[in-house]
Image (cartoon, rainbow, N blue to C red):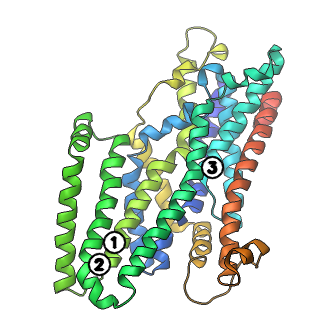
């Protein structure tokens, strides 16, 4: 078990490193709207986003199970095999995300961690099957194919949904407010803003509460039962407040909506993506604890216990949140990745980072061709991430399996 203690220490160190490289890449997801629209000074935007991250980490407890049983079946692996899988995943994830950060390209940390878990699990499962003389078709017993396909299809579906809804909302918003903006914002601004803020309230309070680590079961049940009442009163309260601001002050309510949205996006990021950075190390900690408390030989311990639900310690989640906040404020790579995303959506002129491409020209027939090339590059990077994560982690897991202590030291 001394060797696995060393592996656990490495995993914990990697957790901190992965938080840094992960946030450096994912900060663009919740900062680009506020920074791109110049809603407020950067320090105000970062302060609001930091609060969202810290609050969101407490909503991420339930997501941690994805790293434990979402991609593979833990009962099909023993302790040494599980620890190799986790170590291979963390090593590959840090290298891959930092590569994207170096080139200032945003990618999906969810795609990365999912395909890394899949690649490592497949590699170790194939090795086990070949050594035991079993048919290769037994691979399905090791992989949680149903859940893995659900997660992967959800990632692809999110691209379609975000593009479609984003286009529809943008079209309707421009249709309502573009012409005669000053009068229309006074007529419809409060209603539109109330609906927007109610939607944000829905996702923060109602959807996020399900995975909260500090809310009691009674509070969660109350929120679920009173969902429609919460939404109805939210529309009324926000509508009245925004109308007062429009009628009696010079406050731009759109800036308020963007800043509240930034808080919500940062919260959603922390709640959803924290598992991508610390889910595997926490699963490694649980695995090591199970090995220490095993009745028989821990090296032959089947990891069935990993399939059980677990509640992550709130203090650990907040500690991870603090690391993410510090990274958000001081990471130069986070700024460069954010700059890439903001430049792809800017309205004014400037230096284009991406060259023209045939596919982009075909899509737009000579308008924002450089921007389309940039978008295609970013989206294409997701598929490169999936391929690199799967193959890279499979290779690293194989090297760790056969190289043992020497490969771990290397």
Q: Residue 253 — which label?
A: 2
Q: Position of residue 212 (x, y in %)?
A: 35, 42
The quarter of the displayed image where residue 80 is located: top right
Instruction: From the image, tell me which residue sits under label 1.
Output: 257
Disc 2: CA contacts within 10 A as few (<14), some (14-19) or many (>=20): some
Q: In the image, is 227 to the left or to the right of 365?
A: left
Q: Earlier in the sequence, mark 3 or mark 1?
A: 3
Circle nearer the N terminus (3, 2) = 3
Residue 16 appearing in the image: no
Residue 49 x, y percent position in the rendering:
41, 64
Q: Are marks 1 and 2 in contact (CB under 8 Å)?
A: yes
Q: Is residue 249 left or right of residue 363?
A: left
Q: With respect to residue 168, does 323 lie above or below? A: above
Give the side of residue 111 with respect to residue 223, left or right: right
- Residue 385 position, x and y percent, is 70, 53
CA gap, disc 3 to disc 1? 30 Å
The vertical placement of 72 against 293, above or below, is below
Is 15 placed above or below 268 here? above
* Count of numbered marks: 3
Q: Secondary structure at mark 2?
A: helix
Q: Secondary structure at mark 1?
A: helix
């Amino acid at each position: 078990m001394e060797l696995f203690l060393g592996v656990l220490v490495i995993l914990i160190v990697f957790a901190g490193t992965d938080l840094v490289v992960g946030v450096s890449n994912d900060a663009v997801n919740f900062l680009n709207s506020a920074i791109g629209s110049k809603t407020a000074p950067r320090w105000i935007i970062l302060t609001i986003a930091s609060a969202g991250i810290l609050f969101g980490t407490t909503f991420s407890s339930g997501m941690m199970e994805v790293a434990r049983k979402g991609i593979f079946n833990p009962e099909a692996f023993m302790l040494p095999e599980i620890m190799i899988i986790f170590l291979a995943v963390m090593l590959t994830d840090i290298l891959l995300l930092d590569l994207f950060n170096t080139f200032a390209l945003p990618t999906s940390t969810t795609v990365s961690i999912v395909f890394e878990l899949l690649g490592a699990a497949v590699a170790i499962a194939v090795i086990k099957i070949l050594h035991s003389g079993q048919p290769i078709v037994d691979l399905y017993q090791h992989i949680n194919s149903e859940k893995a396909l659900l997660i992967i299809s959800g990632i692809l579906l999110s691209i379609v949904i975000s593009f479609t809804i984003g286009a529809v909302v943008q079209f309707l918003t421009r249709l309502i407010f573009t012409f005669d903006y000053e009068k229309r914002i006074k007529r419809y601004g409060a209603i539109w803003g109330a609906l927007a803020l109610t939607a944000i309230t829905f996702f923060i309070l109602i959807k996020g509460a399900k995975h909260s680590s500090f809310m009691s079961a009674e509070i969660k049940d109350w929120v679920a039962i009173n969902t429609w009442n919460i939404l109805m009163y939210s529309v009324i309260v926000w509508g009245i407040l925004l109308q007062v601001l429009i009628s009696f002050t010079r406050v731009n309510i759109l800036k308020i909506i963007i800043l509240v949205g930034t808080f919500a996006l940062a919260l959603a990021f922390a709640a959803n993506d924290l598992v991508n950075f610390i889910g595997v190390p926490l699963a490694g900690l649980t695995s090591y604890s199970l090995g220490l408390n095993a009745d028989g030989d821990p090296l032959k311990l089947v990891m069935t216990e990993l399939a059980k639900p677990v509640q992550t310690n709130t203090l650990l989640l907040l500690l991870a949140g603090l690391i993410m906040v510090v990274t958000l404020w001081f990471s130069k790579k986070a700024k460069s990745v954010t700059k890439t995303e903001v430049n792809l959506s800017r309205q004014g002129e400037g230096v284009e980072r991406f060259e023209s491409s045939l596919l982009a020209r075909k899509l737009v027939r000579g308008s924002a061709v450089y921007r389309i090339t940039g978008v295609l590059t970013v989206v294409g990077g997701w598929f490169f991430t999936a391929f690199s994560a799967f193959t890279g982690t499979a290779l690293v897991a194989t090297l760790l399996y056969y190289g043992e202590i020497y490969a771990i030291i290397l």
